[in-house]
Amino acid sequence: MSQALDEIKIGGLGASRKRVEDSRFIRGKGNYTDDITLPGMLHMEILRSPLAHARIKSIDTSKAWDIPGVHLVLTGEMMATRNLAWMPTLSYDTQAVLATDKVRFQGQEVACVIADDPYIAKDACEAIDVDYEPLPVIVNPRQAVADGAPVIRDDKESQAGNVIYDWEVGDKAGTDRAFEQADLVSKLQLHYPRSHPSPIECCGSIADFNRATSKLTVYMTTQAPHIIRAAVALVAELPEHMIRIISPDIGGGFGNKVPVYPGYVCSILASILLERPVKWIEDKSGNLISTGFARDVYLDGEMALRRDGKILGVRIHTDADHGAFFSDAQPSKFKIGLMHSAFAAYDIPAAHLTARGTYSNKAPGGVAYRCSFRVTEAMFFQERMMQAAADDLGMDQATFRRMNFVRDEDFPHRTPFGFLTDSGQYAKCLDVGLKAIDYEEFRREQAEARKRGRLLGLGISTMTEPLGAGNSREYDILGIKMFDSADLKVHMTGKAIVRTGAKTQGQGHETTWAKIVSHELGIPADDIVVEEGDTDTAPFGMGTYASRSTPVAGAAVAMVSRKIRAKARKLAAHLLEVSEEDVEWELGRFYVRSAPDRGVTIQECAMAAYSNMPDGMEPGLENTAYYDPPNLTWPFAVYIVTVEVDPETGVWDVLKMVAVDDCGVRINPMIVEGQIMGGLTEAYAMANMQFITFDADGNCVGSNYMDYLLPSAWETPGFELHSEVVTPCPHHPIGAKGIGECAAVGGPAAFVNAVIDALSGTGVRNIDMPLLPDRVWEAITYRRDVSGAPPVRSDD
Ligand code: MCN
Ligand code: CUN
């Protein structure tokens, strides 16, 4: 008779366990970087450039030094004496820590002051006198490659112009042939604007160098503490074992906290020089103008079509504006991230993508923000192109997608750009979505409304996202292979601690990793504590971004649990006095095959590991697993939205939105739903209201929260979520696929497609995001596409 535990009751897989971390967050008891105070701690503030491009003629810091309470004023010149004026980026470029020769974007770090408190430091920054000689400014790729364009990176000897890379992937000849055979070629051009993750907590660090022990401890807001440790070791030439990076609670990352920022480096150098802890907490505008910008890509594509709707081939050209420094974190093999995941869900014989990256006088930008290395742009373009092609063919949007989907029986499927997708039920997800939105009925209503001058629209977007880099064969950052790890220690009373190389920033790892251990070992989730983010205690890992935690670190948690179970089995055999082969496992308990009533619990095995192990067995019940996934995981989703556009004002409202997400096995359904809701909210904000761009002088327009709007519950529409389609990942130990970014990746195109659909018949093919009322109004009134590409007029 089975005495197995009820997995849902103990909080294992499938249980909608409340997030354990929330009990401290909602009580205001979180421990964020800014909550930490160390004895003798000083405070650092940064002076930023008001100009986008200018030669620095001189910097006079004498008045700042004279202010009582100032301990140190750092400039680029001083950094240069220690070879720290420049630092390497995660994409094999260099970035100025503090400007020496020129400033290259508005908001660039020019000097730092370290003082008794942040107010003195701020005042002292204002007392620094910088003499700038303005230079011509570049704010888009067209200007970057124009004849006579100023060379932004004249610091690099090998850099002749402003092009960072020219890159291509796919089958050029095959694609050319597809276009020759096409009955119809559909074209689309658009700009995916800059967007900013804007986590509630800004970036910051507290560096604490102890001369007596030579140990450097840095508390910092980073999504990838081990990469930072390696970077500090290499840049500051400190021994790696003497560096401890602690990433405490993080108030949202969303990609903003992946890069290495000058503020971190300056606080570290200041602490080494002053031998005191130095705290730097970025202010909101500093965060918004200088860190972690995403997107800024011009996409120009065309699709070769057969009259019956079959897609024969796709060509895409991308121009990415990276700002002044190429500082994205992305796998080194792929210059434009995973942009070539575009069209992975569709069965397309041939495709070719060319990509060019250029410098501009804007803050470093590119990869970060809920995107798995530019998948956001890829899926956005894909679904906007699908809509345009269906319209050009005069075909129904749903039918056109369904007929081109990779079919369930065709997995594993090689995408036209070379990825291997392994599972999914695309048509089924679409059907669930169409039913939920009541597709046929809406189309009828839409036609009726049109007769009365009302503009209703429906937008479909699908996305399949490659989540979980590595495998290590293909994916590395700066040569460091992408795998992850988990370390599990079961104490003698059967309670446990699990640590991983990932770093939660709000995703709920403290809740979900415990559930995986529960699922594998039957230890109740409440008996397991999860810890991440301390490089002295956590096993080496590449951190949390690209929704890689569940696919990689989560898999490592399952694998280390299985190692523990294998040892516990030996202990059980010893306790039950039978041979190991006679021992069976059920959740939480080993028993004798021939006598199921005779058993021992996992907790009894744990006690034996410390008190009664068999002769010759190593004591203890602990282990570590490194997991190198065989493939990425490929979640799929369908998002459908209906809108009404007011033709008089261009204002549009969401009528209904449905989301069908298939992320394989859901570890914690409630957390998955939270991730989807959050992602859809961000998608809505990007599509509807978030405006941050640049004028011709390189001034950052929209660099405040009056223009760059963070949606609250008030303006966010309701979302209807569907979870009935579950296609387990064939290679993940528990069948899970990533989910953290899906809705933000696939969501934006659904909104834009809906608004464009509402305008059908006007000839408008594209309005660049955000779809602000004036842009929609302009499109309706003048029956023309509306571009949002910079430069904008500064009074916009
Ligand atoms: N999960 C699950 N079942 C699945 C998949 C995931 O229960 N089949 C759970 C996971 O165990 C985890 C959460 O959902 O608790 C997200 O998992 P995953 O998809 O693995 O993503 P990561 O944990 O790697 O999170 C990264 C992802 C990224 S890249 C961005 S950007 C983003 C996002 O998560 N930043 C966030 N969501 C965020 N949510 C919050 N609150 N804060 C951020 O900064
Ligand atoms: Cu691209 S933002 Mo998330 O991968 O940290």
Image (spheres, grey):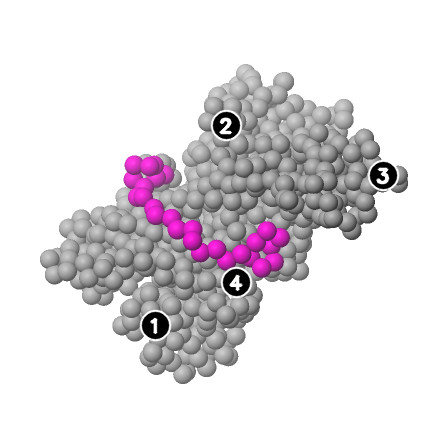
Rendered location of residue 69, percent (x, y): 56, 17
Residue 732 location, quadrant:
bottom right
Viewer-side label of 3, 4: 3
Residue at the left extreme? 452
Mark 2 or 1, nearer chain start = 2
Viewer-side label of 2, 3: 3
**Mark 1 element type:** strand
**Mark 2 element type:** helix
Viewer-side label of 1, 3: 3
Q: Is residue 703 above or below residue 182?
A: above
* 70, 328: nearer the viewer: 328
Residue 569 location, quadrant:
top right
Residue matched to label 1: 186
* 23, 566: nearer the viewer: 566
Asked whether, in this view, residue 144 is left or right of residue 218, the answer is left
Residue at the bottom extreme? 181
Q: Is residue 592 above or below residue 120?
A: below
Q: Which kind of residue does numbered mark 4 sit on?
A: Ser
Q: Which kind of residue does numbered mark 3 sit on?
A: Pro
Which stretch appears magenta? 710-735
Residue matched to label 3: 614
